[in-house]
Image: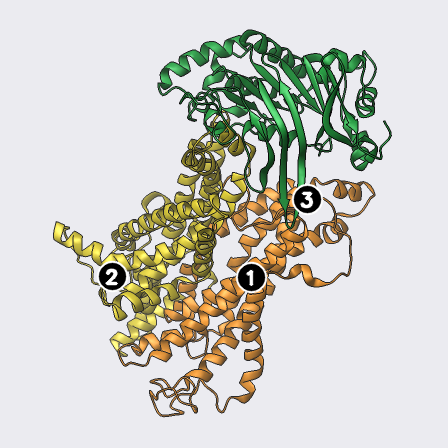
Chain colours: A yellow, B green, C orange
Amino acid sequence: MGVLQYVAKRVGLYFAVLFIGLTITFLLPRLMPANPIDGYIGQIQARASGALTADDIVQLRANLEQLYGLKGDLFSQYVSYLERVVLHFDFGPSFTYYPQPVSQMIFNALPWTLGLLLIATLVAWLLGNMVGLVAGYFHTKKAATILEVVGILLYPIPYYILAISVILLLAYIFPIFPLSPTFPVGQMTPQKFGMVIYNSLLPALTLVLAGFGWNILSMKALAVATTEEPYVTYARLKGASNWTRMVRYVFRNAMLPQVTALALSLGTVFNGALLTEMLFSYPGVGLIMRTAASGGDYNVLYGAIAISIIAVATAGLVIDLIYPLLDPRIRHK
Amino acid sequence: MIKLNDLKISYRIGNRVIEAVNGVTLTIPDGSIVGIAGESGCGKSTLMKAIYGDIQSPMSLSGGSIEYGMKGADGRAVTTETIRREWFKSISYIPQSSMNSLNPVIRIRDQFTDFPGTDSNKKRVLERARAYIGKLGLPAEAMDSYPHQLSGGMRQRVMIALATFFQPELIIADEPTTALDVVVQKEILLLLMEVQELMGNTILVVSHDMGVHYQVTHKMLIMYAGRVVEYGDTESVFADPQHAYTKMLIDSLPTIGDDSMRGVLASMAGAGGDRAYRVEPELIEVKPGHFMARPSVGVAA
Amino acid sequence: MTTESSSAAGAAAIPAAPAAKRRDSLLWLLNARLAIGLSLITIFIVGSIVLPFFAPADPSLQATYLKNMPMSWEHLLGTNAIGQDIFWFLVFAIRNSLILGVLVGVGVTIISTAVGLSAGYIGGNYERVVMLVVDSFITIPLLPILIILGAVIRGNSSFLTVGAIIVVFGWAWGARTIRSMALSLREREFINMARFSGASTFAIITREIFPYVSAYMVVGFINTILFAVNTEATLAVIGLSKVEVPTLGSIIFWALNYNALFTGNYPWLVAPIVASILLFLGLFLTSTGFNAAFANKRGVA
């Protein structure tokens, strides 16, 4: 009964958070100092260079309000917003690429972002935790301190600095990778796939380096503490090998808080991924947002925020649901 | 038979060297339960570690030797250096905090098979283990459970099962009943006695609780400040204690009928630096099978 | 939204008894990390306060000097493609970034402490609602929101508006951690004593719980500075904040925009990177140094 309760609670929280997040996303544009409609009208006027009459503008405004769901009082807007988003994933049309729906643009870019994110985060978590485990288990050796220092040096460095340093080192000083990565579009062929991998390595490396440091440090601390536990000592006195103790005893227990930590860090990791995409012109959600920001395409931006919230919350839920599989104390009783 | 020959074990702390065991000469007979009593810091835990073979920096064997009287798998006599290979084969260990001595995320049955002492055929081991734990009063499902699903008493039975399953010649039990409530304590002690009778091995029981010693042990060893103060058959030691320290330990036992014996030694903590109890390493046979150590020079008997 | 296990933000353990309020020396603070970290930060802080007085001109003005001049005694890091002196731009950039960081740090610390303490201590439905809000804020990724802000107000925002937004979305993390601390403290003996002696909730929170939480607050404050400087720079690097104002991020933005690498003007790009790395290292070492010192003081490490 414990597991069902746990799952129900998590799923309930998930929907609650989603609801609050979407509501905030709804309120945001209405709280911003500038009215997007004015922005659009301004842009259209600029393009039409004065060919619009005052009547035209009134008509245009009315149409835009209809189109972007800004008609009617706040509450009815809210209801129709929720309806549109939750039932149809409809965020309206893009302004720059009218009439292409925002949702389509985002869903095209989403697999790129998710692919990069998932692989990089997994690699960073696994590698970082393994290194941290060894450093913590053998913490009396000098090599362990060196590993810890590596973690300390990497952890505080922000994504953009890592990205630029990576570019400096691996695309400029040692030109192994392209300075301006290009990503093929259209149908995927094996050759194109190879290109994708090649060009994705630098952004992926950036993400891995960013997450690696924290995992080393926290895992090392956890491993040191866990190695002191009575059950590890007992395993030693049973004659269990170092490998058995390190992996079955220390790691299997120390990784639990690390899984929780991963769930908590998803927001940050997502932010970092978006930024990295922008700096590498990687065709994910980040790049779309950046372009939309310059072009004043607000629907894309708000749509992207909503999708971001959904993505992060869902990933968190998935991890929360995996946790009982790893910790039998939650699973049984 | 285990022979301790003027055994000295020391710890290095910073610049100082502390002689935790300071010259112990003793023969521990086969097939009996030997209790070791004394307050914290008297050296009993260190002595057990040394006998078990768990000697690692900053601890070291600074003098004397241990003769195990056993032969290893290679046919040669077991020594302090090679005893490690006998862990959970010829010699085993029951830890103090059974609460925390089992890996929380791995099933009990897997903890029967994850160390070198076991048979390589895990299936066979588990079959026999399932049958065996029934004899210790554990239900068959216990094997497939996780530690947190068992009560404290059941977990301690599991520890005893693990320690005795491979039929070792020597078992060291370090405060085996300390964290348990009184009723469960009794059960565990009885279990230990049954197991020993069945297998005929030697069990060393370390406890600060004199009541435990009285109930369970055949012979008793009293330690103080790294040396043996008194040694003999339990009945003899309790009935006619020779050394002042032993007398004090026994006197601090509540009278018969009172089963709650908690923190008996808390009151004796103050006796730590008391020079009145210091002894020489040699044991003198005062009565048949009953030995006592001479008080050190400058100390009244 | 996650399990109740301890927060990943490295929440320090709670001590076993209230520390006596002594005015002993601050030597317990010193450890290698803290020393290095504080030295680094002090250099930056002192530099930011003192150096600007010596600046020959407003570094954000363009075309003040000849473009792309190499490093020399007159221009310590050379000049950039817009005719600004890189060194002075960097000095002001560091100052502005630090100012933003500290202001945001203060704001976030106040809010997260108030929310976290009250939620943790008062509990009940208040806590549930508050934590729901907190979890939602944690889930909402900050960057997209900032990007929208940047898009909407591009160029017209004051650099402090960015700071305000960071405060609005950045307090959630700290609140979570502080609430966990308050939760565990709530059950402590001395809290119960205070409660039974009739102290008001407010008094208990400020006088009993606060001193413990203050250790974390110092650490959290420094972490927030790191976070704020970082976030603002992130926004600037992609060109979505008021990039005319010298900050660590805007200097990088301009360097990238003017292809500093291709034109061979390395100092323009490399200097701010090195400065940023050193600053962040300094902040991080200080924060973990404090953490370790507090843990040591309580005898936990």
Give the residue number, with chain letter if any, for mark 2.
A98
* Disc 1 crowd, CA 10 A, few/some/many (<14, 14-19, 20+): some
Residue carrying label 3: C185
Please tell me if label 2 and label 1 are on a single chain: no
Pointer 1 residue = C33
- Mark 2 vs mark 1: give the one in front: 1
Q: Chain of mark 3?
A: C
Q: Residue A228, how many percent across, how many down?
A: 55, 39
Q: CA distance from mark 2 to mark 1?
A: 55 Å
Element at badge 1? helix
The residue nearer to you, when weighing A241 against C158, is: A241
Tell me if label 3 and label 2 are in contact, CB under 8 Å.
Answer: no
**Chain name for mark 1:** C
Label 2 resides on the chain identified as A
Q: Residue drawn at (37%, 57%), measured in percent from left and top?
A: A209
Closer to viewer: mark 3 or mark 2 = 3
The amino acid on which the numbered mark 1 sits, given as a three-letter code, is Arg
Looking at the image, residue A34 lies above or below residue A9: below
List x then y, in percent, for residue A243: 41, 36
The residue mark sitting in front, 3 or 1, is 1
Is residue C224 in view? no
Q: Quadrant of residue C277?
A: bottom left
For marks 3 and 2, give the CA distance. 57 Å
Tell me the distance, in whole angstroms, between the alpha carbons under discs 3 and 1. 28 Å
Disc 3 packing (10 Å; few <14; some 14–19; many ≥20): many
Circle 2/circle 1 CB separation < 8 Å: no
* Whether marks 3 and 2 lie on the same chain: no
